[in-house]
Amino acid sequence: MTNEARTPWVRLAKRDAMDPRKAWAIRLGSILIALLLGMIPVFITGNNPIAAYGTIIKGALGRPIYIKQTVKIAIPLLGCALAIAPCFKMRFWNIGAEGQITAGAIAASYFALYWYQKVPSTLLLLIMFVSAAVAGGIWGLIPAFFKAKWNTNETLFTLMMNYIIIGIVAWLQGGPWEGRKGSQIIPMFDQSARLPEVFGVHIGWIIVLVMVVLMHIYMNFTKHGYEIAVIGDSENTARYAGMNVGRIMMRTMFLSGAISGIVGFIVVSGANHTLYRGVANGVGFTSITVAWLSQLNSFAMIVISMILAILTKGASKLQTELKVPMSISSIVTGILLFCMLSSEFFINYQLIFRQKKSEEVCR
Amino acid sequence: MQNNCAIQMCSITKRFGQVVANDGINLEIRRGEILSLLGENGSGKTTLMNMLAGIYQPDEGEILADGKPIAIRSPKDAYSYGIGMIHQHYKLVDVFTAAQNIVLGLNDEKLDLKTINSKVKRICDRYSFAIAPERKIYDMSVSQKQTVEIVKVLYRGADILILDEPTAVLTPQETEKLFVVLRAMKEDGKAVVIITHKLNEVMELSDEVAVLRKGKYIGRVRTSETNPQQLTDMMVGHSVVLNIDRPEYSDPFPRLTVEDLTCVDHEGVTKLDHVSFTAMGGEILGVAGIAGSGQKELLESITGLYPVKEGSVRFFEENGCETELIGKTPMQIRRTGVGMAFVPEDRLGMGLVGSMGMTGNMMLRSWRSGKGLFLNKKSPEHLAKKVWNDLEVVTPSTSFPVRRMSGGNVQKVLVGREIASRPRILMTAYPVRGLDINTSYTIYNLLTEQKMGGVAVVFVGEDLDVMLELCDRILVLCGGKVSGIVDARNATKEQIGLMMTSVGQRRASDDE
Amino acid sequence: MSSLIALLVASVTFGTVLMYGTLGEILTEKSGNLNLGVEGIMYMGGAFGLAGAFTYEKAVGVAASNGFVAIVIAVVTAFAAGAIASLIYGFITITLRANQNVTGLALTIFGTGVGQFTGEFMRVREGGYVALSNHLKGAFTFQIFPSFLRDIPVIGRILFSHNAFFYIAIALAVAMHFFFQKTKTGMYLRSVGESPSTADAAGINITKYKYLATIIGGGISAIGGMVYITTTAGCVWNHEGLSGVGWLAVALVIFCMWRPLNAIWGSILFGALMIMYLRVRVAFIPTEIYKILPYIVTVVVLVFSSMRNNKEKQPPASLGVNYFREER
């Protein structure tokens, strides 16, 4: 131990509440840093990072048709982030949105494939909507039940449920629902089972925007929202207050799964017009990023889901034009999350540097 | 005197955010002497000593060992200067054996059981400890764990021992034993510091007393030249009347009868064993016992939070109607309208929602009220403002997270809410733990006020002096059994202390 | 009988992949860090391990390439990739004290992205196809025991017919068991995961232990990804086959009750479940349904392990919780 260094040159202390505006400024800064870091792999592939961002923006927003496609990508992200928000608020780590989307998609597809001649279009869509919600909800309810009963690890459980349901779709694809024998493809939906379009994009965007408002109200002004917040803070407090923690957990997961299921319905009925094993396409995971980056704030999710959609759409352009693999978008998404998580440190803690008079120096 | 000096702390200042926990404190620790560091809860004693143990870093000031300035950046540094601290919450790994815990972190030590055991045995012989080195910590009693802690510190060759509230969880008999050990250490030329707020222990044990108040150093006196009154004055700043007002309610009546209440935890250990008593409206029933004797389980099983194996808890209306509470969930109990308020021990972890403000916390009782899906935020907001004013809670707004408030204010929010529910039974667990003396008295007054309003108050406490002055009757728990119920007006501390360790001896003379 | 042995041998091949993933995560979790990024780490290990061997072969030419050197390079690059990924995780959770669950998920997203990116980028740059020469492929699957041992009936194939990675994994498991139970450093590491404040008060450098366990653990997990690509996937980048393996490894840690020795048979058992659809056909179960068997078993395992209740069979007590000394 050296004698001159009598106190460490820097140490940590918890910070009192920070001005929310400053906190958001830090978060915004971290997003910018993430976008910069995200360009390192582009640089490695021998491309100009600035040009790459140009390509991304152009590829995502350059033409009206691109914008429509970008919005189509944002819709399930936003919807699914809304689904995840109450779970994460409750500290229930639901990473099974992928499977819950798929479950909803299966249910919706069943009616789309086998009922389209039996009922009129509007009713058919309504049935698909409801059945998708119920199926997604049940798929989310199963892990919640075991969590409530035996405190079974929900992270792994929800995740395994993804693989199980995706396997079921794979079976349907090559088995009972297969179109032409040997094609391994489920036939396209009839026109009556497809969502109508408004402004050139299927009405899924209206559905999710309505859900944004509803979720905001649900989380902030209802008894359910209060219960979720209390459980997220302390399960013991919730029990003390007379809340049935297990039941609330199951209810919330059913709701979350139902919203994901609705997203599954929107995807099959609005975008794909068919069902295949990759129907969820990683949305369940990316939406975790959306939910966390927006600090579970419903309205912020609109912006974040658009940013990530631009990234995804632009990345496909990047691949065709600059031969940069599309997976760059997951790398940037990961980095975004890393930076956002790191920024919380500067919001909650302060570093105190050794000085004659210990002044408080932040960052 | 000067050459005995082991450690000098010079103008030490430590802040936590806005709070100044230690403000320019000077303290000298000498070998061959037992020093009491006296002060109320929250006066900064533990913080000060944590800086010697390497847990905290001082913001300002200097620490000298044998006259030379030193930096204690980690607990490891502390050991290298011979400083060992026994924390109030024992630092032991539950799934390790005693021996493993003792040698944990020692670099030059081989994991050779023989050597360890013989060295441990030597220490045990010197101070007549009895510990089984191969025993796992989770199988040990509190006092055994403390012994392991002490051996651990001695094993590391510490000659400056700091003990933080070592007697808080011990019975009077165990405390006596500990004092014998500490005196023997003093004989061996070690420096001993005990952090405490119990005056009698200070008088009995220490050579000198240093007093802290609200983070400031007040003074240092020789124990032989002082008296409890002077120490109290130093501790609280001004002469306080030690007497707690205990008016008598004219007509106490049975409110709650507990019969043969038995609880078993999820590991099959019996936590409560056929507990029976009656709580009277218009009286404060104290519950005494060493920590972990079933106090928590008792309160939680009555409120429906802890599973009950057998027994009954009956609530009596004024008109004689009775309601059985066992088998009901907390929500069902609330719906029966018996009016049960509960101030749990773990305030932020059970009684309050740390991340919410006062309003959100007031809602914890009323969130179900009103029809429909939506929350009623108006009346909790109103109640929050009332509690804020009535109990003089220090907070910038009713939406300021209670987690960021000081301990006393947190407790005011909790007690304020519980009393506002107009209870007929008020159960409190360690309601003044960690509070300064003024807030403590505020709480005592509130409880007494409730009692005079005919409420049956149950007070689980740890400070017997307070309980003897505040309560009307005291129920003593020992290992989940009721070892007796005494009249607080003519019981003595020694009597209760004995009952805390042995069951059944006084049952015959109960005044029930 | 012979088909049963063939099943067992194939289970061991796949189980080896899981074993690395599981052992690495056990080491990480013993320090109290729950790294849910194993999936991403194994992707990175797979992609970089392959890239390392491939680059080596290209640099020296197929003829001059040495199998042993290729293996060493693959192991080192995979380990380094996993270590760097875990370093990111470690920095964010240990130093910056962010939520471990979300950070792990972020690492999964990031790592699968990086792995995919690397695999794809190599493919694009090499004009369509990246694979090692048969010469090196053989080196990775080389059966290290001499043929007279392998030819012993039954036992020979069960015990001696595997590639080097399997025996290294077994040795690693035994070494880790010894490390946790018998060495001082292992005991210190466990104390960090059980009760960091105790370890801290005892003078153990928490940060150092947590970082080292997380980084080395991540490196070991990453080797699993490399082993998958070079043995099961035939030295071609195949993200489909690797998907889900990392998560199974995390689940296996719970199944093994944080004990390295249990990881040996646990991994082989799950390896069997993973490949059973190829070896043991059951007429009335469609292949796609058969393939989800390991995930169903995992769910069942999770449920049963959450129902058990034993002081010695619990996760490290502070698993998932960050430590801040001055926490009040």
Image (spheres, helix red, strand yellow):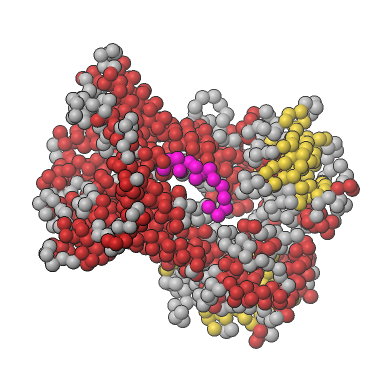
Task: Name the dominant secondary structure of the magenta segment.
Answer: helix
Q: Residue at coordinates 73% horizontally, 29% vertically from top-left?
A: B323
Q: Residue A176, how many percent across, how many down? A: 27, 25
What is the magenta range? C298-313
Which residue is at a point 23% across and 48% down the rendered structure image? Answer: C238
- Is A94 included in the stretch rendered in magenta? no
Instruction: Describe residue A77's horizontal placement relative to residue B365 as left or right.
Output: left
The image shows residue B125 at horizontal and vertical percentages of 71, 75
Tell me: residue B498, above or below residue A320: below
Q: Is residue C151 visible?
A: yes
Q: Residue at x 51, y 44 (%)?
A: C306
Q: Is residue C90 left or right of residue B37?
A: left
Instruction: Depth check: give the residue in front, B313 or A228.
Output: B313
Q: Can you give x and y, in whole percent of width and height, for residue B470 in the image?
A: 78, 50
Q: Is residue C301 above or below residue B223?
A: above
Estimate the x, y position of residue B494 in percent, counting from the top left.
83, 59
User: A292 or B283, which lies in front?
Assistant: A292
* Residue C306 forms part of the magenta stretch: yes
